Image (spheres, grey):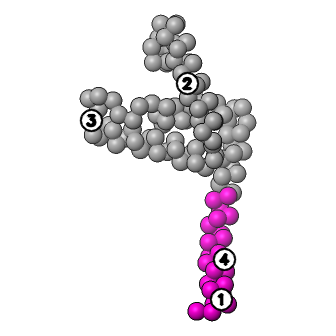
Amino acid sequence: MSSRSVLHQIRAMVADRLPQFRKQVAIGEAYARAFGAPEGRVVLTDILRECGLLEAGYAAGMSATDAVHADGRRTIGLKIIERLRWSEAELLALAQERTAEEIEAVREGSPGGTGS
């Protein structure tokens, strides 16, 4: 196979994948705009908490169905994080915020951090 033939195949492969790549970049940029503002950060944090991203993956006595459901929720949270290209430092900051809120909730007498 000639180098010209290989180069032609590579160009064709790139051309085929370029629209999908552009779409993924646009989606990532939209996520960054949506969650980049302070209000978006509040919404993002709430979504990630609802996804159980900061919770243990399995609790003693949890049924298999509940474990699968919890894993599915976490997968959505991880997909959002992937789209945003968050660093480990950003995830750690979110976990630290959650821990601080849980400590404050316990001090106020409402274990679990729900405030109720």
Instruction: Establish if 15 lies above or below 42.
Output: below
Which residue does the image show at 52% across and 7% down from the upper left?
108
Out of 113 and 99, give the one closest to the viewer.
99
Q: Secondary structure at mark 3?
A: loop
- Disc 4 residue crowd, few under 14, some 14–19, many 20+, Cα 10 Å: few
Chain-order first, disc 3 or disc 1: 1
- Please give the residue where the numbered disc 2 appears in the rendered image: 98
Q: Is residue 50 visible?
A: no
Instruction: Establish if 34 lies above or below 54.
Output: below
Whole-number angstrom distance, CA of label 1 to CA of label 2 = 55 Å
**Quadrant assignment, res 96:** top right
Q: Is residue 29 visible?
A: yes
Chain-order first, disc 4 or disc 1: 1
- Disc 3 residue crowd, few under 14, some 14–19, many 20+, Cα 10 Å: few
Chain-order first, disc 3 or disc 4: 4
- Residue 63 — which label? 3
- Please give the residue where the numbered disc 4 appears in the rendered image: 15
Prevailing secondary structure class for the magenta stretch in the rendered image: helix
Out of 104 and 6, give the one closest to the viewer.
6
Which of the two marks, 3 or 2, is nearer to us in this view? Answer: 2
Where is residue 52 shown, x and y percent of the image?
46, 34
- Please give the residue where the numbered disc 1 appears in the rendered image: 3
